[in-house]
Amino acid sequence: MTLKNRYEEYTESEYLNIINRLFQGGFSSEKEHDAFVDNIVSTSEHPNGTDILYYPEQGVEDGPTGVLKTIKQWRAANGRPGFKIEE
């Protein structure tokens, strides 16, 4: 799975796959795990950082779908670009 540098380089399904992979675990090393966490945090630009992954706000689904929804809503509300169009 190739990690990209910017949120808008991902399609929505690619980004959800990255989040799903993080939640599934089974990484070969802590370095690989950290790369996924860092990629989600840096590309999402969400001000809550890793908290969106590990400490969702009250009423937010604690899982990949909840993380994705939180990121998408925040980005839309703050004028950030969305996902690349699915091909």
Image: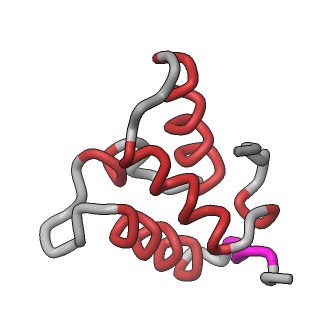
Q: Is residue 10 above or below residue 5?
A: below
6 vs 36, nearest the viewer: 36
Q: In this view, does 77 lie above or below 53?
A: below
Q: Is residue 76 above or below residue 52?
A: below
Q: Is residue 39 above or below residue 85?
A: above
Seen in the image, is 65 located left or right of residue 58?
right
Q: Which region is colored magenta?
A: 80-84
Q: Which colour scheme is used?
A: secondary structure
Seen in the image, is 66 located left or right of residue 8?
left
Q: Report x, y in % for residue 47.
A: 45, 52
23 vs 55, nearest the viewer: 23
Point out the image quarter for the C terminus.
bottom right
Main SS type for the magenta part?
A: loop
Q: Report x, y in % for residue 73.
A: 47, 79
Q: Which residue is drawn at 76% across and 44% down?
A: 2
The extreme right residue here reads 87
State which quadrant residue 3 falls in: top right
Q: Residue at x 34, y 70 (%)?
A: 66
Q: Report x, y in % for residue 50.
A: 39, 42
Q: Report x, y in % for residue 20.
A: 46, 56
Point out the image quarter for the N terminus.
top right
Numbered label tally: 0
State which quadrant residue 65 falls in: bottom left
Q: Which residue is drawn at 56% across and 48% down?
A: 40
